[in-house]
Amino acid sequence: MNRNPKISGNGNFKADGYQSVESCKNQLTQLNDLFEAKNPDEILKWAAATFGSKIVMGTGFGPSGVFLIHRLYQLGLPISVFYLDTNLLFSETYELCDKLEKQFGITIEKITPEYTLDEQAEKFGDNLWYKNPNRCCFIRKVRPLRNYLQDKSAWITGIRRNQSESRKETQLVEYDSECDVIKINPVAAWSSGQLWSYIKDYDLPYNPLHDESFPSIGCIPCTNQVENGDHERAGRWKDIDKNECGIHLPVQTGT
Ligand code: SF4
């Protein structure tokens, strides 16, 4: 059953059932206007009620992911969480995944690429991440995500506007045309400081590499420490003309 999102006179959503991607896509501007004044909990509750079992949350285990997993747990929202396992993540990242699973009694689904690292090397040569990082990201992140989202209607991410220049236009609700799903970014307007205050207040686990000048953590070959004053994603694909892996761009927004 597909219903249109219902906006009542006081500007509140009546999230009373499943919505299609198409109906949300047609109301992105209203949704974003409405949610700009709302907190992440309200967006998450709307998302769960709107997309039911057809929504998932993706995480790379940064502070926003820890925050969102904790909010889903506290709110009792049955939204599955997944991560893209490129086979190149830091051991600290895998350990954090285990800790979160234990602490919140969840299983975080691991999405893997079509090729193992050996198969990739055999097909494209060693160290593809240095020779052709866009192709490497496509194989290890973008294509697995597209495949995984094929039977989903929406996904939640932890991206934020002030993470980098390339993310400054991030909307709370977007249409992800590459995957034909609604993309929901509940902490788009939050700062890094807000997330860290929350993590400290609730004594939540986090990746210890963050304490060693790694504000943003991805795959080992493409993650470096940052200098004081660098923006938080400056250590990703350092010294090359690349700042996104491709799973967050391009998107079509409602504005
Ligand atoms: S971040 Fe680097 S290692 Fe990871 S998939 Fe992209 S290019 Fe490959």
Image (cartoon, grey):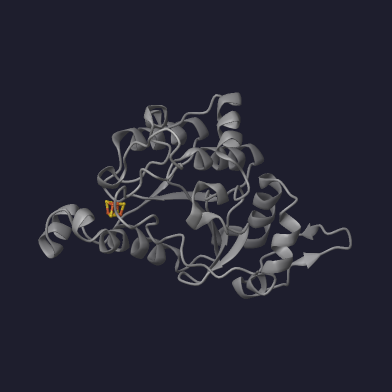
Q: Is residue 210 left or right of residue 30?
A: left
At horizontal 73% and vertical 49% (from top left) the residue drawn is 38
At horizontal 64% and vertical 56% (from top left) the residue drawn is 47
Considering the image in quadrants, where does the C terminus appear? bottom right
The one nearer the camera, 55 or 128, is 128
Relative height, residue 164 to residue 149 (above, below): above
Relative height, residue 43 to residue 9 (above, below): above
Q: Is residue 90 left or right of residue 103?
A: left
Q: Quadrant of residue 39?
A: top right
Rendered location of residue 55, percent (x, y): 55, 58
Rendered location of residue 81, percent (x, y): 48, 48
Rendered location of residue 201, percent (x, y): 61, 25
Q: Is residue 219 left or right of residue 124?
A: right
Relative height, residue 146 to residue 227 (above, below): below
The one nearer the camera, 211 or 175, is 211
Considering the image in quadrants, where does the N terminus appear? bottom right
How many circles with numbers are drawn on the protein? 0
Q: Is residue 11 left or right of residue 155?
A: right
The one nearer the camera, 155 or 173, is 173
Q: Quadrant of residue 223?
A: top left
The one nearer the camera, 210 or 181, is 210
Is residue 15 among what the camera can see? Answer: no
At horizontal 27% and vertical 42% (from top left) the residue drawn is 220
Is residue 250 among what the camera can see? Answer: yes
Relative height, residue 49 to residue 153 (above, below): above
| Furthest-right residue in this view | 9
